[in-house]
Image (cartoon, rainbow, N blue to C red):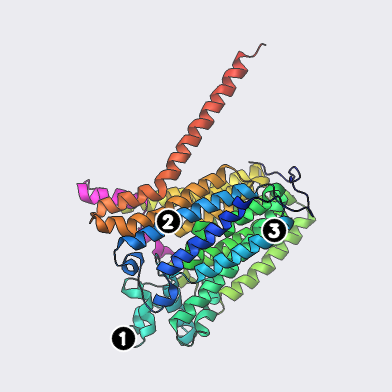
Amino acid sequence: MTHRTQSPEPDIQAGELAPAHPERWLAGFGTVVAGLLLVWQFSFLDYSRALVDLWKISEGEVTGFLVFTAAVAMLTGAWLWSVRALRGITLGQVWLPVAGVTMMVFLAFLLVYPATAIDVYIYAARSHLFSDYGLNPTTVMPQQFWDTDPYVHYASAEWADNTSPYGPLWNVIAAPATALDSDQIETAVMIFKLIMVAGTAAVGVLIYHIGMIVQPRDAVAATVAWLWCPIVLWEGIANSHNDILLMLLIVAAVLCWYRGLYGWVLPLLGAAALLKIVAVMIIPAAAIAIVMRVGWTRRLLEVAVQTAILSLGLLWISFVPFYDLRGTIDAVESQRGVWVTSPVLLLDVMNREWGWGLDVSGLFDGFSSAMIVMITFLGAVLAWRNPDWLPRIAFEQLFWFLLLATSNVRPWYAIWIVALSLVLPLGMPFVRAVVLSTGMLASYIYSAWIQNWTDAEWLERVACNVAIMIGPVLILMVWSGLRTLRAWRAEGASVSSAPM
């Protein structure tokens, strides 16, 4: 798990021209074409003031299914091919075509309707409460204005009676989108999209700089692996999930860690936690890693003072509109009652359908809490043993949280895993990220069309979605574990048979 600080020099030295590899740019072209296919079939300009989804836009016909499936296949194939083709290439040889393709791809996905999650419309409806009424979205529901303000209808009837589950920092970040939208929902949504485009580009820059530290030979490949990643483009830009900003803060903390700017690490992770609470699991490991790296020296006191000052400033910025700590805690705790496409939801549906009589919810509450504590504690212990492991620890903590500790598994959460896999040397973490994110994106093919065409029952829908989203990465983990076990046994056998 130790990260390399040096790598062999790339095959192409700075200043040389990159060899002509048309297939490398064919991958970029395929990414652009896939984006344009999605714009053609699911255009934001056509549906900007409506709440629709893939099924409704395609009217249940096979054309939409074929376009989406082809686009996902093209995006995935081009993504993996581009990463392979760009390994060993320096930025000086490819920055122009990479930047050009990236801008075209971002523009295409800006114009794609958020057809698998209306969260960005819900962001706008809740932020509207803040920017136009001066109310706290963390404690006030859009439903309160349902009969008097049509704008809040974009929260949808399903979510209008819910408060915002995000931290107070998100209220501050989101406010400009609705403050500048002139009460036009399409303007607010486009501003959110532009925010996520900027965030995605910024994460790419950070990944490149981290790559130059941990894997210089693959820094460009890692950057493109983020910028052209299908789940990032679809969930981060088209659907405009704020997980992009969550990872911007966490990846920034990782870069500060690698560069020895320890006073910034905990404030940035704290900012991430004030956006989405899941980041709080990383903080104890980071704190211990900093202490172990710096040692009990005068510099540790300097780091502590800088951390305290930056953290207090962050808390002031986050809470200054309302100073409602209790409301924030209640909003975060409310998420424990959200059960969506997860192994425990499948277990609960099976329990209800087959009459097992188990209290699945009660059992999982205890199990989930124990797992979160264990994941956090083990991360801290590993950081104490070797602080150099911190970026890998963060990756593993969020990965296992998704698999074991939450009842709410959403495809866009794969953005976390992709980003953190790319602050490490390209290897098995990236393979896991590829398999997980591909399964997450492929699940829409089933949930948007196939389950409706087959009129599947609830148990079948949940089972198929869980199998598509999580099944492939579970199979990969079992295979990887068996392979590691065989390697250990082979190593043990060779040691035991060695002459004394």
In this rendering, the answer to whether 394 lies above or below 33 is above
Give left or right: position of 205 versus 357. right
Sort mark 2 into few (<14), some (14-19) or many (20+) by Cα contacts within 10 Å: some
Magenta stretch, overall SS: helix
Dot 3 amino acid type: Cys
Along the line of sight, the residue nearer the viewer: 293 or 111: 111
> In this orientation, which residue lies closer to the viewer: 339 or 87?
87
Q: Which residue is mark 3?
A: 256
Circle 1: element type? loop
Q: Nearer the viewer, mark 1 or mark 2?
A: 2
2 or 3: tag closer to the N-terminus:
2
Say what secondary structure mark 2 lies in. helix
Q: Are marks 1 and 2 in contact (CB under 8 Å)?
A: no
Which is nearer the N-term, disc 1 or disc 3?
1
- Give SS at disc 3: helix
The mark tally for this picture is: 3
Mark 1 is on which residue type? Answer: Asp
Based on the picture, tell me whether residue 67 belongs to the magenta stretch.
no
Tag of residue 70: 2
- Specify whether residue 350 is painted magenta: yes
Q: Is residue 279 visible?
A: no
Q: Nearer the viewer, residue 426 or 403?
A: 426
